[in-house]
Each structure stands twice: as C-alpha cells, then as structure tokens.
Image (cartoon, coloured by chain):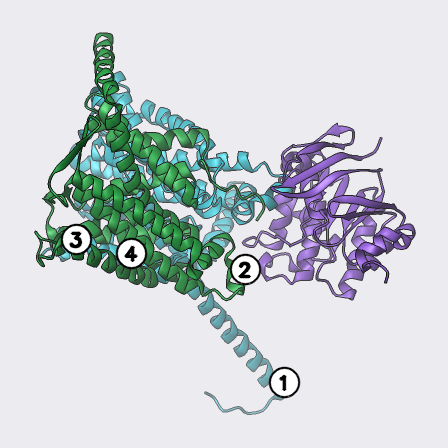
C-alpha cells in the first residue's frame, strides 16, 4: 500500500487550470522531490494535499484512507504535516511557544511521553533543529534561516508519517542549505516519508530518491534524479528549446 | 392571543389585496428608496474597499451633511438657494472627510480595531457637536420641491423623484469615474492588492484621502436627499439608523463589493417599502427590517451575496 | 509539619509576589481595596467602585476574546444584556433567588455564545466586527418590540431586587462592594491564568496566523468557540451583577454604548494584558466621576464631547493601550538600573584589582 496516492487531481481557478489530471504515488520511507518552474502548480498541489483548498476533481488517499476535502487540522492529525514556502511563525509568541502550539494538537499531545512536560518536549524539538538558544526569543526577532528551521520543528512536533516541505531551502545561503539537509536526512532515517518541493536542484537531487516534474499543472516526467536531469522534456522546460 | 393573531392575518390579507390592486406603489417607492440607499452604501463600500476602513462615522457624516445643508439652505442661517446649498454642503463634507481621515484614521492605519473605535469616537463627537449647535429637538426640514406627480395609480412627490434621479446619476458618475479615470484605476488597484499598487507608484495616502472625500460627500448627499425628500426631519441621534442600514446593505451585498452594494440597497429598499405598506403598523417595523435582513444573512451566508472569501493570504 | 507548610506558603508568596515589583504593587492595591470601606467614604463612592468592579470583569472578559484569541467582537454587550435580563426575568416570572438565577444566567450566556459563535466563525476581521456589532442591536430591537413588552418590560426594563434585601441600603452597598471585589479577583485570576496557559498560547496562535495554526493540527473552530464561551461566561456574570446592583435590567444593557465602553476601557488599559483593562476600568470610573463633580459648570453635552475627544486622542497616540506603554517604560527603567548596578560592580572589581587610590565621586 502506498502511503500517498494521488489520482487525477484537477484544480481550476477561474479560467486558469492550475493542476490538470495529476496522478502519482509515494511509498513509505521515500524521499520524493517535486520540481517545476514557477506557476507549475507545486504549491497548489501542496494546498490540495493538506486540505487548504478543495480539488475540482480527483482523489487523494493517505495510508489507504480517502482524505480528499478534509479540513487541514484533521489531515495533520492523521499524520500528514507541511511547511510553508513563505515562513509563517506566530509572531507574538516566543520560539518555544511556536512549537508548543503544535504539541497542543491531539496528535502532538499524544507524542509527549509520560513524565515529560510539553515544554521539555518542545525544547528537545528545538534542539533537534538547532534552535535551543533562541528558545525564549519572540519569533518575530528570528533570522530567516532560523525561521525555516522553526517551520520544520513545528511540523515535526506532530510526529508526521508524511512530511511535505515547501521550498525549505528558499532564501538560504549555501552553508544554511547544507546545514538544513541534516534534519531532513534524519527524518528519512527515522522512517518518515518526505516530499520536497524545491528550486535548488542540486540540493534536491542529492536528497531525493525519486523526482516528479510538473509543468503548467501537468506531470511531464517521473524518475530518479539522474533520469530527470537527462529527460529531454524537463531540459526543454527549464532551459528552453534547443537552438 | 390566537384570536388577535387571526385578526392580524386577515387585516394583512385585506391590505395585501388593496396593495395588490396597485403593486406599482411598492415598485415605485421601493425603487426610489433603493436608489438613495445605494448612494449611501456606496460611500461606505468605497472607503472599505480601498482603505480597509470600517467607517463607523458614516451615519454621522450622513447626518452632518443634512444639517449643514439645512443651515446653508433657505431656512437656515445663510439662506442660500437649494442647489448651491447642496453643492456647498457636499464639498464641505468632502473637506471634513479629508481632515478627519488625516488627523484620526491615518495614524492608526492597519489596526482594524483602533480605526473602528476612532471612527465611533468621531461619530459621537459629531453627535455632540450637532446637539450643542442645533439643540436636541426634532428639526423639521422642508422638501426640495413642493408638489407631487401621479401616474399609474400611485402618487410620488417631486422631491422623491428628484432624489431618485440624483441618486442614480451620482451612482453612475462614480462608477464611470472608477472605470475610466486614472485615479479610479488606482482605487481599483489598491482595493485588489495594496502592496503591488504601491510598487506601481500609487501614493496610497493621497488616494485614501481622496476616497474618503468622495465617500463623505456621498454620505452627505445621501443624507440631504433622504432628509429633504422622505423623512423631512433631522435630529442629533439620527446617525445610527443610516449606519445600521449601511451595515445591512454591505453585509447583504458583501463587504467591499460595489455591485453588492447596489443589489443590496435595492433589496433592503424594497424590503422596507414592502414592510411599510403590507404590514399593518409597518411604519414602526421599518427600522427593524434592516436588522432582520442582517440576521437572516448572518445565519445563512455571512459573507454576503458577492463577498470575497480570501482563503490563503 | 505546620511550620513547614507555612514556610512553603511564605516562600511561594515571597518569590511570586514580593520579588516582582508590579505584582507587589498590585497586591498592595488589592489590600487597599479590601480595607477601603473602613474609611467611611460613603455609599456613593462604594457604589461607584462596585460598578468599576463589574466593568473590570466585563472588560477583562472581552480582552481574552479580542486581545488573545483575536476575535474582534463589537457586540459584547449582548452577553452583558443576557446576564442582566436572564437574572431579572427569572426572578420576575419564577421568583427565584439570585443564587439560583445567576448560574442559570451564566449557562444561558454560554449557550448564546455558542449559538452566536457559528455565524461569527465563518467571517474574519472587519466582517466579524460588523457581524458582532449587529447581533446585540437585533436583540435589543426584539426586546423593545411592542408585542413582547409584557414579557421584556419594553423600554423601561425589568426591576431586579438586590442581592442582600435583608440589609439596610448603606450596608447593602458595602456588601455589594465586597461581593463584586471578590468576584473580580476570582474572575481576573481565572482569565489571566487561561490567557497564560497552553490554551492561551493556542489562542494567540489563532490571532497571529489562523491557517498556520490549522497546519499545526489545531481545531481552530473549537478553540474559537471556547474563547467565545469563556469570554461570554464572565461577561454574563458582569451583566447579572450589574442588574442586581442597579436594581434593574433595561435595553441599555444591550446597547452599543456598553460594547464600546469596554472596548475603550480595554484599549486604554492595554489590549491583551487582562490586568490592563481591570486597572483602566477603575481609573476611568474615578476620572469620570471626578471630572463630573469638578467641572460642574460645564453642561452635559460638552462633558461627553470632551471625554470622547480625550479618548480619541489617547487611542491615536497609544493604539495598543497605555499599559504596554507603561510597562515598556518600566522595563526600560529597570534595564537602566541593571546597567548601573553592573557598572558599579565592575568598577568595584576594578578598584580591588588595581589597588590604587581612586578619586571618590
């Protein structure tokens, strides 16, 4: 059984078809990358999978269960979490409180072991992404790179089985990018399934086992990173037609 | 209790029958009321759509317009003719609107709650000023023109007809202005996406002030039109009802939608007229119609007919 | 064993209250308030302070909903009015004593919050503000309906007996003062604790970013309803107390005036703090009565006008409330003090190390 099955997913916004009959599967424990130029429908796909918008047609199955059209928080509590392309921390709260919110969800709450306080658990999650020094700092004072890590810590707080990262390396320097690959690899080692949307192809190709390429809302290629980088259509889409 | 109810129903049927003979009464009067309400709601919607300000002083400015018109006009201190008094009143309210905006709303830009509280403060200040200047008593206001016309079985006063015409013309003028002129395009742009509009070189502060001027002038004109044609009386506490009606129309039509304001205005106008003519002692209930509509909309579809639902910011 | 317990209580008290200057101040104020009636100030001032207590509860309840959960409610008078009318009508038609009518009124208030909450949940921001403002207006027109006047008492309202009918008026005032003061302390503490609990953290997350909160697995709808219900509970309490203290429940309790009064109180006191509005309720009440007594030659219309002008100016200058401004200033002063202390310490260490004669300042 695939952990995620997407079948014939279509979404239109007025006259614009953002996603057109997209289908793919993801197996447990995989790291899958999704690439495509801007406007290809990657973020729309994320919104659809996590319940923030409803598809016009098609189904989404998570662990065999049909989650199409469910509310976002219900999907999260089933084990599917996401981060956002543009970081959205809770500005008025300190960093640790940002993680505490996720731990207040039903699923997050279950993960707190006996004799451990939620604060303790939150501190551990911050340590995992390297943010423990900023614990009491209001989230609005954090640098961009730290906020990206906070996004991941928050998503991990609900102990998801499938984690969807929307451009996690966006706006990061090469050093920060390299630093961030560690938590992502650790997720993979923990047995979590990861889907990453990313523009930084070299970072993505190093992490992903399989890559799906989207263009104008349609799947144009699927395969290993090597196969994708040699795929004629993908090159055409990114580089333009050969002269 | 049941007997009284039965009696009321049969009385209502009689009234309905007599009204049924002349549905043109409701059709005509409802249209006139709808048109004037449209003008009232347009100002409210404009300042919200462009500047995201819920102007709680809208009703107060409506009232202030009527009072200034009265003071300038034939029965007031300045004894001007009707037409110049009207224009002068509208212009002065526009200027007052700019001053109010610059002094009180601009400093709290972005803070929805503070803007609401501040505009309520303005409304109450206007109420007190009117109270001090004109006294607490009901001030009778003469209609624009004496006389009435009769056609198709109904009688409509000339003042009401004039108000109807002026409202429609002004509404159309504003719509054309928004569609055609550069400033109008700037207003539409800012209403859709403020930041991009700023990147395109739109000076939002100036634009907000201009929109406020238009909005307050429209409110004042609506006030003058309604008071001089329909209610024929002015008192310092009359700012709450127009505000409630503006709310009803805007909740019904959808906050920020000009189309919605027009449609909503006519629906509210017809509902009020229908209640006034069809239900015995309906005059008392007229004020509650707006509220009743709001209640129904809130229960069924809080974002209104044409309200925009912003899902992902 | 008893001494151990007492010692623990004292340590907890010393570290929680005495060490923190603001809390010590609040505690001393509280003591002052408790012993105030002994000063023989007269029934009128006690009455005034009783009303301040009630308004403080009302304002604090609003602060939780708006300052923490971010649900802008411009119609909180709805619950105030429900509290007043519920206790009044239950007394009038069923002859029930206050200790039965009040809990029922509270339950009705919470029920109303859940009912009203549903349309409110589907709108945000300015739309929510409008929607909440309109609901008590509708309720007040229903109450004023000619047809319902025999039940609701129409414009003149419903008379309500005092909490303590067995006491003389002057003693009643004292008793009411203590009752409302104790209820204020209890309500304020509960509201403050909720605001600073994990639930309060979730409330703030909803205020900051509703979608982000959903992405954390939070059932935002449930938390919004919780915020509404909790806030309504205390607002209804305030309304019920009000009815018994002023001996009546009238349509004014549902009016925009009360909705806006607490908005002004809360903004002046500091939105989101819970204790700010409580302090502001007192200050405003005292100011109001003093301004009234001092400026007697000023006619009533001017009095209200000046009050409004002052409020508007304050809100423009300090949109987030005066409490934040004051606490920020206090924190700055504290930092300056700390720097001075550290500087002195460094200076002393330096002198010891160098062992040189230094000119004394």
* Residue pointed to by mark 1: C353
Kindly identify which residue carries mark 2. Answer: B196
Q: Residues within 10 Å of mark 1 (few under 14, many from 20)?
A: few
Q: Secondary structure at mark 3?
A: helix
Q: Chain of mark 3?
A: B
Indicate the secondary structure of the residue bearing disc 2.
Answer: helix
Please identify the quadrant where the N terminus of chain C is shown: top right
Front residue of B84/B148: it is B148
Q: Nearer the viewer, residue A80 or B276?
A: B276
Residue C169: which disc? none
| Distance in Å between CA atoms under marks 2 and 1 | 62 Å
Instruction: Give the alpha-carbon distance from disc 4 to disc 3, as whole Å.
Output: 29 Å
Q: Report which colour depicts chain C.
A: cyan
Residue B69's label in the rendered image is 3
Estimate the spatial distance between the alpha carbons at disc 4 and disc 1, rounded to whole Å: 57 Å
Residue C257 as seen in the image, left or right of residue A190: left
Q: Nearer the viewer, residue C103 or C180?
A: C103
B121 with respect to A51 (left or right): left
Label 1 SS: helix
Label 2 environment density (alpha carbons within 10 Å; few <14, some 14–19, many ≥20): few
Q: Colour of chain A?
A: purple
Name the residue tied to disc 4.
Answer: C311
- For the residue pair B4 and B108, the one nearer the viewer reads as B4
Q: Nearer the viewer, mark 4 or mark 1?
A: 4
Q: Residue B53's x, y, as percent? A: 39, 52
**Quadrant of the rendering where the C terminus of chain C is positioned:** bottom left
User: Does mark 3 fall on the same chain as mark 1?
Assistant: no
Q: Classify C21 as above or below B37.
A: below
Would residue C189 be seen by someone viewing this image from the given angle?
Answer: no
Work out whether residue C335 can be spotted.
Answer: yes
* Same chain letter for marks 4 and 3: no
Q: Nearer the viewer, mark 2 or mark 1?
A: 2
């Amino acid at each position: 059984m695939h952990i995620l099955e997407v079948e014939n997913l279509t979404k239109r916004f007025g006259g614009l078809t953002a996603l057109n009959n997209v289908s793919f599967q993801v197996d447990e424990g995989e790291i899958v990358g999704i690439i495509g130029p801007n406007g290809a429908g990657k973020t729309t796909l994320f919104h659809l999978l996590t319940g923030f918008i409803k598809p016009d047609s098609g189904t989404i199955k998570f662990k065999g269960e049909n989650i199409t059209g469910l509310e976002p928080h219900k999907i999260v509590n089933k084990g599917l979490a996401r981060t956002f392309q543009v970081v959205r921390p809770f500005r008025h709260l300190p960093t640790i409180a940002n993680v505490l919110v996720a731990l207040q969800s039903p699923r997050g709450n279950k993960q707190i072991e006996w004799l451990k306080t939620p604060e303790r658990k939150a501190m551990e999650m911050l340590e995992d992404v390297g943010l423990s020094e900023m614990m009491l700092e209001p989230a609005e004072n954090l640098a961009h790179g730290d906020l990206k890590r906070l996004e991941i810590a928050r998503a991990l707080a609900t102990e998801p089985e499938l984690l969807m990262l929307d451009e996690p390396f966006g706006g990061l320097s090469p050093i920060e990018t390299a630093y961030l690959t560690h938590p992502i690899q650790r997720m993979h080692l923990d047995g979590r399934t990861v889907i990453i949307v990313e523009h930084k192809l070299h970072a993505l190709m190093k992490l992903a086992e399989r890559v799906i390429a989207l263009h104008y809302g349609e799947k144009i290629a699927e395969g290993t990173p090597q196969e994708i980088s040699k795929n004629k259509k993908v090159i055409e889409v990114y580089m333009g037609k050969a002269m | 209790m049941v007997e009284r109810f039965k009696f009321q129903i049969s009385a209502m049927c009689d009234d309905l029958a007599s009204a049924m003979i002349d549905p043109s009464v409701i059709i005509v009067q409802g249209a006139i009321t709808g048109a004037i309400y449209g003008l009232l709601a347009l100002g409210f919607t404009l300042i919200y759509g462009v500047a995201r300000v819920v102007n709680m002083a809208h009703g107060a400015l409506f009232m202030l317009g009527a009072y200034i018109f009265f003071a300038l006009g034939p029965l007031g201190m300045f004894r001007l003719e009707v037409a110049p008094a009207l224009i002068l009143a509208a212009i002065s309210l526009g200027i007052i609107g700019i001053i109010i905006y610059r002094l009180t709303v601009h400093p709290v830009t972005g803070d929805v709650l503070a803007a609401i509280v501040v505009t309520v403060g303005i409304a109450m200040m206007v109420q007190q000023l009117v109270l001090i200047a004109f006294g607490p008593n009901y001030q009778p206001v003469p209609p624009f023109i004496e006389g009435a016309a009769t056609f198709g079985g109904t009688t409509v006063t000339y003042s009401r007809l004039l108000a109807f015409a002026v409202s429609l013309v002004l509404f159309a003028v504003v719509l054309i202005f928004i569609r055609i002129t550069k400033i109008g395009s700037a207003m539409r742009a800012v209403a859709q996406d403020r930041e991009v509009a700023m990147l395109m070189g739109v000076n939002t502060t100036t634009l907000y002030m201009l929109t406020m001027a238009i909005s307050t002038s429209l409110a004042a004109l609506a006030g003058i039109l309604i008071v001089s044609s329909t209610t024929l009386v002015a008192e310092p506490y009359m700012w709450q009802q127009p505000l409630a009606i503006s709310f009803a129309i805007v909740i019904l039509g959808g906050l920020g939608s000009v189309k919605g304001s027009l449609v909503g205005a006519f629906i509210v106008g017809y509902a009020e007229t229908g209640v006034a003519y069809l239900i015995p002692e309906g005059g008392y209930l007229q004020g509650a119609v707006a509220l009743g509509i709001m209640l129904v909309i809130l229960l069924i579809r809080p974002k209104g007919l044409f309200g925009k639902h912003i899902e992902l910011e | 064993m008893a001494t151990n317990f007492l010692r623990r209580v004292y340590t907890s008290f010393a570290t929680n209250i005495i060490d923190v200057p603001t809390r010590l101040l609040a505690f001393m104020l509280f003591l002052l308030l408790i012993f105030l009636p002994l000063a023989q100030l007269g029934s009128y001032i006690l009455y005034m302070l009783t009303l301040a207590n009630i308004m403080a509860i009302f304002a604090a309840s609003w602060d939780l909903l708006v300052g923490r959960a971010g649900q802008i409610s411009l119609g909180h008078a709805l619950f105030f009015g429900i509290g007043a009318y519920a206790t009044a009508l239950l007394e009038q038609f069923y002859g029930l004593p206050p200790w039965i009518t009040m809990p029922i009124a509270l339950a009705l208030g919470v029920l109303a919050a859940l009912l009203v909450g549903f349309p409110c949940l589907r709108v945000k921001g300015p739309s929510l503000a409008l929607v909440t403002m309109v609901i008590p207006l509708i309720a007040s027109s229903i109450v004023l309906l000619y047809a319902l006047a025999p039940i609701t008492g129409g414009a003149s309202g419903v008379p309500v007996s005092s909490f303590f009918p067995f006491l003389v008026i002057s003693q009643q005032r004292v008793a009411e003062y203590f009752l409302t003061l104790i209820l204020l302390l209890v309500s304020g503490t509960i509201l403050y604790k909720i605001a600073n609990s994990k639930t309060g953290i979730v409330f703030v997350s909803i205020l900051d970013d509703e979608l982000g909160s959903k992405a954390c697995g939070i059932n935002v709808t449930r938390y919004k309803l919780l915020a509404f219900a909790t806030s309504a509970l205390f607002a209804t309490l305030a309304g019920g107390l009000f009815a018994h203290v002023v001996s009546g429940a009238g349509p004014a309790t549902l009016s925009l005036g009360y909705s806006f009064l607490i908005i002004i109180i809360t903004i002046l006191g500091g939105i989101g703090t819970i204790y700010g509005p409580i302090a502001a309720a007192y200050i405003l009440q005292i100011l109001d009565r003093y301004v009234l007594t001092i400026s007697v030659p000023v006619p009533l219309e001017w009095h209200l006008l000046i009050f409004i002008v002052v409020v508007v100016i304050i809100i423009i200058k300090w949109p987030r409330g005066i409490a934040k401004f004051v606490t920020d200033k206090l924190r700055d002063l504290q930092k300056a003090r700390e720097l001075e202390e550290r500087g002195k310490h460094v200076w002393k260490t330096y002198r010891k190390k160098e062992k040189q004669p230094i000119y004394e300042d």
